[in-house]
Amino acid sequence: MKTRWSRRDFLKSTTAAVVLGAAEKALGAMTAPLPKRRLGKTGEMVSCIGFGLGSRYCSIPDEDAAQALLERAFVLGVTYFDTSASYTRRGIERLSETRLGEFAKKRRKEVFLATKFDPRDRDSALRSVEQSLKLLQTDYVDLIQIHSLSNLDDLHRMTEANGAIAAIQQLKEQKVARFVGITGHNDGVAMTEALRRHDFDTVLMALNAAQSANPIAQRKMEPIPAFEQSALPVALQKNIGILSMKVMGQGMLVGNSAGRASPAELLQFNLSQPVASVIIGCEQLAPLEQNVQAALNFTPISETGKQKLQEKVAPSRSAWQNFLRSHEDSVAV
């Protein structure tokens, strides 16, 4: 019987073959295992590079190519995969979780699945997580996180009797989530208070060479302590697992022009912090390979080197701060 392939089938198979073929060709260049670090009091060992399935990843139009990129990350030693209920592409609901579910169902015990929810009330949060489990094709997640703490008022809302913190506590008690955490992009004061007041297992915070030197409040435009100077010490004191994001400043810090640095330099800055894993968004094979290679070649940056890098990216600091003031991490791309 003759097999008939449609043009769509051919294009899909070709796209995946190109991606996987390029990956196989480069595989010999990276034989050392990707280092793992302890995720605070959880005791879990996770890859020092985490795969972020946010806006960059959701921009990939071809499903086979999107799956091939996850496969390649896993082959390279990435075990930490970060998604969210709100990561998607316009017109496609929860694209990120759907893609991750297809990938992870074959190797559930081999990967660390982290997702997030946006609602600040308990019932809505629980409904969001229920849908996450369906899309991730699992009956539990390794980490559930309250997404994007914005300020002290936001913290107050989620702390109410039927707030989001009550939801994550319930999810952990019911073993729907092994661990619980919180994420934030800008307000070091609010994040510091959240970590002081509540028993989170992990914290995911924005951290890069431009943000740590001269942070500002998201709305009041007042200088405030960065995560590095405020929330980070509290997390260390409480043995909370620390995860970092925005290492490249959404690409705004990468390049050869004034105010920019190489991905390897920016990654070195983050890996030199007391973080378990640096979560990096990716939509192409080459940057993934480069980031893993940089992690394999990592040596801690000195204080002098740290200051020099902060000075190097200083011209980009204003643009990065403007981005943070208007950034909505839950808006579809």
Image (cartoon, rainbow, N blue to C red):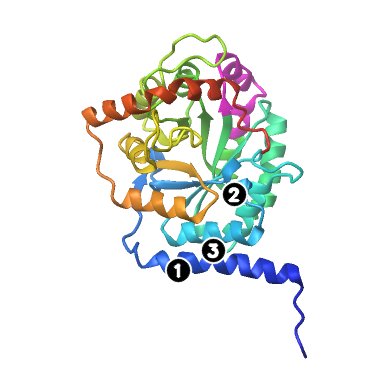
Q: Which residue is drawn at 44% across and 36% down?
A: 248
Dot 3 amino acid type: Val
Alpha carbon distance from label 3 to label 2: 31 Å
Highlighted range, magenta: 148-168
- Classed neighbour count for the residue bearing mark 3: other residues with Cα under 10 Å, few (<14), some (14–19), many (≥20): some
Taking 195 as reference, is 220 above or below it? above
| Quadrant for the C terminus in the image | top right
Residue 17 or residue 112, whichever sits in front: 17
Alpha carbon distance from label 1 to label 3: 9 Å
The answer to whether mark 1 and mark 3 are in CB contact below 8 A is no
Query: Helix, strand or loop at disc 3?
Result: helix
Q: Which residue is drawn at 40% across and 23% down?
A: 315
Q: Mark 2 points at which residue?
A: 140
Taking 70 as reference, is 89 above or below it? above
Point out which mark residue 19 bears. Answer: 3
Residue 234 or residue 159, whichever sits in front: 234
Dot 2 amino acid type: Tyr
Query: Helix, strand or loop at disc 1?
Result: helix
Residue 7: x and y, percent?
75, 70
Q: Which residue is drawn at 68% across and 26% down?
A: 121
Residue 150 among those drawn in magenta: yes
Can residue 189 be spotted in the picture? Answer: yes
